[in-house]
Image: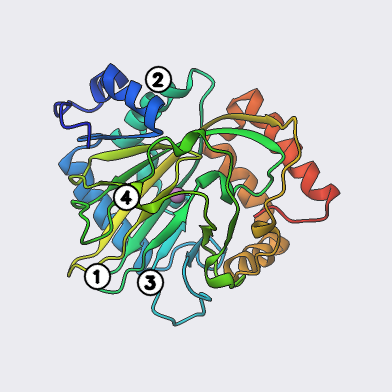
Amino acid sequence: MTNTDNKPVNPGTTAADILTPSQAEDYCQRGFVAVQQISTPEEISSLLKIFQRLFQDRAGRREGMQYDMLSHDADGDAASLPTIINPVDYAPQLRKLIYRSNAFAVARLLLGPKVVPSFEQAILKPPRRGGATPWHQDEAYRFDPNFEYRQISIWMPLQAATTENGCMHYIPGSHRLDVLPHRSVNGDTRVHAIECAGGFDPASAVACPLPAGGAVLHDGRTLHYAGPNRSDGPRYAYILSFEVPPVPARQARSFSWNKEKRSANLERRHSWRRRGGVAIEFWRKFRRGVWKSPGQVAFELRRALRALWHRRPTP
Ligand code: NI
């Protein structure tokens, strides 16, 4: 960890209060950096209650937005890595957070003024049986590889994250790599998660334990992993991702691992969309502010047109 020099902040101030110049430099050099505080203890305890309820109520499951990343995600199965995509769509209290404004400020500092919110995710590693998040680059999950992406994810644990309960691990400098080949976990296309198929040395990984309400920031190409949860308590994380509006790529790429995906959550999502979910999805994107940036509108339209042209529903 290189970030122990940063002092606790009074959140809600400026990005420079959260991220020192040396930490910003670290992010550029290594593709990730940890900060000790991006939210407040009060906010963390209220987030814990919100996410406990959302996971218990299976919010978003019917729409394919809550699912287990590591299994076939059958109804009634005990999930080992449950997740909710865009939890803000199911809990309006998440719209205004100190964490959200601090994360946005830091993303702007690192990626520039064009940065926009991209998506968000809550992940639960249940006690004792929470599975490992396989090594991957976030960009490898992007549905359409024919855009140039510049994205940052801000990963905040809601309790201390340790090597015992599944803190993040990173490969320093891997953000300078291309997107490496990935595959479905165990070669099973019905499992949502993908894993990097090689081309890096896991022994060079750096573990990033964090206090509750601290965060790690990582680039869309930085290789990362989170271990299983061997502790007696749940490990919750809330991730906010931001990006510069993607533009068409100059060179074609293929992410075959996404094309072959047959996971149950995608089936549920497509079926929900056919039943009218498309309009709700459009409205939710509007409410999240996606349409405020002309660059992001252009990306969304291009992406939808490309999906139509190739007769593939976007995930
Ligand atoms: Ni990731």
Marks 3/1 in contact by CB < 8 Å: the verdict is no
Residue lying at 65% horizontally and 57% vertically, measured from the top left: 258
Residue 270 vs 245, above or below: the answer is below
Which residue type does callout 4 highlight? Answer: Met
User: Distance from label 2 to label 4 (Cα)?
Assistant: 23 Å
- Residue 80: give its label: 3
Q: Does residue 133 appear left or right of residue 43 in this picture? A: right
Q: Does residue 1 appear left or right of residue 218 in this picture? A: left
Residue at the disc numbered 4 = 168
Residue at the disc numbered 2 = 109
User: Distance from label 3 to label 2 (Cα)?
Assistant: 35 Å
Which residue type does callout 3 highlight? Answer: Ser
Which residue type does callout 2 highlight? Answer: Leu
Which residue type does callout 1 highlight? Answer: Pro
Q: Earlier in the sequence, mark 4 or mark 1?
A: 1
Residue lying at 28% horizontally and 58% vertically, measured from the top left: 166
Residue 2 vs 270, above or below: the answer is above
* Image quadrant in which the C terminus is located: bottom right
Camera-near label (4 vs 3) is 4
User: Distance from label 4 to label 3 (Cα)?
Assistant: 17 Å
